[in-house]
Image (cartoon, rainbow, N blue to C red):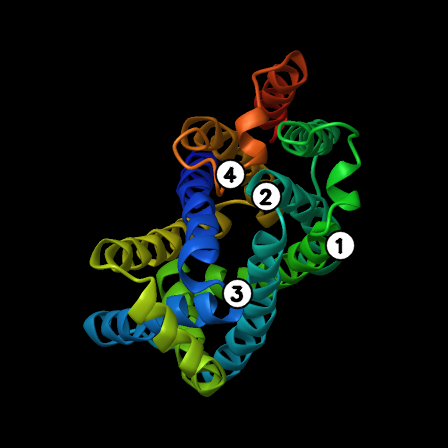
């Protein structure tokens, strides 16, 4: 449990940085979500192939097919997330990730046979409540009244499906193998999508992509791959539902990053400038901490 817990928190922290960078790149550099997604995925292919050759990794054919299916769901979730970021503030989009642990708890019970003590279910609910309320403003249902609400619900469902598909393969082949094959497949898909975004990608590179931003894009995707690997390493040693719940500390980190960065980039993080440390957010953080402590 301790290792899975630590890995899940680490993945959540790394993804919180990636969330902020994603918002920056969607707004200032690539503009169109599909163009940005393809730019990231192009980085995946050489990294994935390099690791496969370096470590001599392999999967049986049936598991490769399962990884391909899982990647289809994962990429669908990623594209929906990019569209949501384009349409809405990062502090409205990211809390909607918190629906994923609830969805995964149901999927885990149905497809993975994951059953827990009552305290763990109470912990999952507390984490969900805390993650949901820490960044919303106004009504607690406001995220679903935003332009990105239902888009992110679909994205969370797609990601939960990907995890359910990957979990048995991680148990037998290991997190490194599954992660490496997944990013390699994702990278290959980027070349299939490249003709549809080629002109826009070239335009963005020429007009918006400075050398500094190019290095940041590369660093962001390496960060994302690292979080992806750490997350599945946690899934390999713990329950997928509980890993998903614990990684929801991501939203606490995003909230903290938004408070720091919003004054520096007011044109991008417009609503985040109005975010304060209110009693409700303090209570939300306490709920997340208590929820994690209840997981067994």
Q: Position of residue 113 (x, y in %)?
A: 70, 54
Q: Earlier in the sequence, mark 4 or mark 2?
A: 2
Q: In the rendered view, does 141 fall on the left or right side of 127?
A: right
Specify the label residue 33 is tagged with. 3
Asked whether residue 294 appears in the rendered view, the answer is yes
Q: Position of residue 82 (x, y in %)?
A: 55, 59
Mark 1 neighbour density, 10 Å: few (under 14) some (14–19) many (20 or more): some
Q: Which residue in the structure is indicated by mark 4?
A: 269
Q: Earlier in the sequence, mark 4 or mark 3?
A: 3
Asked if the residue at tag 2 contacts the one at tag 4, i.e. Cβ–Cβ closer than 8 Å, the answer is: yes
Q: Position of residue 236 (x, y in %)?
A: 47, 52
Q: Residue at x 76, y 57 (%)?
A: 110
Q: CA distance from mark 1 to mark 4?
A: 21 Å
Q: Which residue in the structure is indicated by mark 1?
A: 150
Mark 3 neighbour density, 10 Å: few (under 14) some (14–19) many (20 or more): many
Q: CA distance from mark 2 to mark 3?
A: 14 Å
Q: CA distance from mark 4 to mark 2?
A: 7 Å
Asked if the residue at tag 2 contacts the one at tag 1, i.e. Cβ–Cβ closer than 8 Å, the answer is: no
Q: Which residue in the structure is indicated by mark 2?
A: 89
Q: Residue at x 44, y 70 (%)?
A: 182
Answer above or below: position of 114 versus 9: below
Q: CA distance from mark 1 to mark 2?
A: 15 Å
Q: Nearer the viewer, residue 225 or 206?
A: 206
Q: Earlier in the sequence, mark 2 or mark 3?
A: 3
Q: Earlier in the sequence, mark 1 or mark 3?
A: 3
Mark 4 neighbour density, 10 Å: few (under 14) some (14–19) many (20 or more): many
Q: Earlier in the sequence, mark 1 or mark 2?
A: 2
The kind of secondary structure element at disc 3 is: helix
Q: In the rendered view, does 291 fall on the left or right side of 222?
A: right
């Amino acid at each position: 449990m301790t290792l899975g817990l630590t890995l899940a928190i680490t993945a959540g922290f790394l993804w919180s940085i990636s969330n902020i960078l994603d918002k920056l790149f969607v707004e200032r550099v690539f503009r169109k979500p599909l163009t940005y997604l393809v730019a990231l995925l192009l980085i995946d292919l050489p990294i994935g192939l390099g690791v496969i050759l370096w470590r001599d990794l392999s999967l049986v054919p049936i598991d490769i097919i399962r990884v391909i299916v899982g990647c289809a769901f994962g990429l669908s979730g990623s594209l929906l997330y990019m569209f949501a970021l384009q349409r809405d503030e990062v502090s409205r989009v990211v809390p909607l990730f918190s629906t994923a642990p609830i969805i995964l708890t149901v999927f885990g019970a149905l497809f993975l046979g994951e059953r827990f003590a009552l305290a763990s279910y109470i912990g999952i609910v507390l984490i969900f409540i805390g993650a949901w309320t820490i960044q919303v403003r106004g009504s607690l249902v406001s995220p679903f009244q935003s332009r990105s609400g239902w888009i992110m619900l679909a994205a969370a469902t797609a990601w939960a499906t990907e995890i359910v598909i990957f979990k048995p393969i991680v148990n037998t082949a290991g997190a490194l193998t599954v992660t490496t094959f997944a990013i390699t497949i994702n990278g290959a898909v980027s070349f299939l999508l490249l003709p549809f975004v080629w002109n826009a990608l070239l335009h963005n590179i020429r007009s918006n992509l400075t050398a500094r931003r190019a290095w940041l894009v590369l660093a962001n995707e390496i960060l994302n791959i690292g979080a992806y690997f750490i997350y599945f390493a946690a899934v390999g040693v713990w329950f997928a539902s509980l890993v998903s719940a614990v990684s929801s500390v991501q939203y606490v980190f995003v909230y903290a990053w938004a408070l720091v960065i919003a004054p520096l980039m007011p044109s991008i993080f417009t609503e985040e400038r109005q975010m304060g440390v209110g009693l409700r957010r303090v209570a939300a953080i306490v709920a997340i901490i208590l929820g994690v402590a209840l997981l067994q």
